[in-house]
Amino acid sequence: MPADASELRRGAIAWGIFPFAAQFPMRWLDDGGAVRSLETVEDYAARRRGRPTGVVSEVKIRPVLLLHDGTVEQNDDIVVLRINSVRPRHRESASWPRIETHEHPFFVHLPNSIARYRLPEESIVSLTAVATVHKNALLRVRGGLNRHEMRKIDERLIRVLSLELAPHIAERARELLRSAGISA
C-alpha cells in the first residue's frame, strides 16, 4: 500500500522504489515489446532518433530521504536522496572518518543509535544520488531528520550541485528593500 500523502513531508525517511541510473549496455523494448540491447549511447541515439523508449531498468526498495513535501495533488513526483546501509567497504575506506564525523561533503551519517531515523541499521545519505520517485512508489514513512539536520543537507546540496545562489539572494534582497520603500 502506498504511503499516505499527509506523511510525505520534507525530511521524512520513507521506504520506496529507487531507480538505478541507466547505463550501457542498455536493455530496451522495441515497438513490438521485444527486449533488445544497445551497447552505447551512440547506438541508442542512432537507433531511436529521439523517440520515447521503454527501458528495462533496475530498481530497489530502500529508504529514501524526501527533499520536499508531496502533499500537493497536482505533483505526483517527489525528489529524494538515496539512503545506503553502511557496509564493511564503507568503514574500510579512507573517507570513513570524515563520514562518521559529518565532515564529508557527499555523505551524511545516520547512526543507528538515533531512534527517530527508524532505520534497521547504520546508514548514510548519499547527496550525489538525487532521484525523482512517484508518490505511489513510496511504501511507508518510517522516520525522519529534524530541521537542523535538513538545513545541513541543504547547505551540502548547494555545494554538491554547485548551485550559484548569490545572484538570487541579492535580487530577493533588492525586492524586499524596494517593497519597504528603501532604495537599493
Image (spheres, helix red, strand yellow):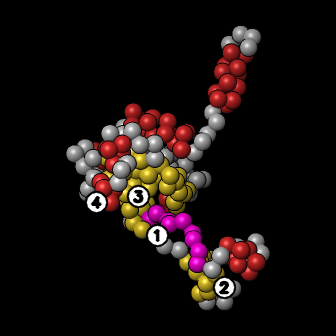
Name the residue beneath numbered marker 1.
59
Quick check: 54 above or below 119?
A: below
Q: Position of residue 155 (x, y in %)?
A: 49, 36
Label 1 CA crowd tier, 10 Å (few <14, some 14–19, many 20+): few
Quick check: 164 above or below 138?
A: above
Label 4 CA crowd tier, 10 Å (few <14, some 14–19, many 20+): few
Q: Is residue 14 found left or right of 37 in the rendered image?
A: left
- Of the residues under marks 1 and 2, which one precedes in the sequence? 2
- Of the residues under marks 3 and 4, which one precedes in the sequence? 3
Label 2 CA crowd tier, 10 Å (few <14, some 14–19, many 20+): some
Task: Name the magenta segment's main secondary structure.
Answer: loop
Instruction: Name the residue at the top extreme.
Output: 182
Spatial CA distance of label 1 from label 4 is 23 Å
Say which amino acid is labelled 2: Asp
Name the residue beneath numbered marker 4.
88
Spatial CA distance of label 2 from label 3 is 33 Å
Tag nearer the camera, 3 or 1: 1
Whether tag 1 and tag 4 are in contact, CB under 8 A, the answer is no
Magenta stretch bounds: 17-25
Whether tag 1 and tag 2 are in contact, CB under 8 A, the answer is no
Q: Nearer the viewer, residue 114 or 86?
A: 86
Q: What secondary structure is marked by label 4?
A: helix
Q: Is residue 103 found left or right of 177 in the rendered image?
A: left
Q: Is 173 within the magenta?
A: no
Name the mark on residue 3.
3
Name the mark on residue 30.
2
Tag nearer the camera, 4 or 2: 4
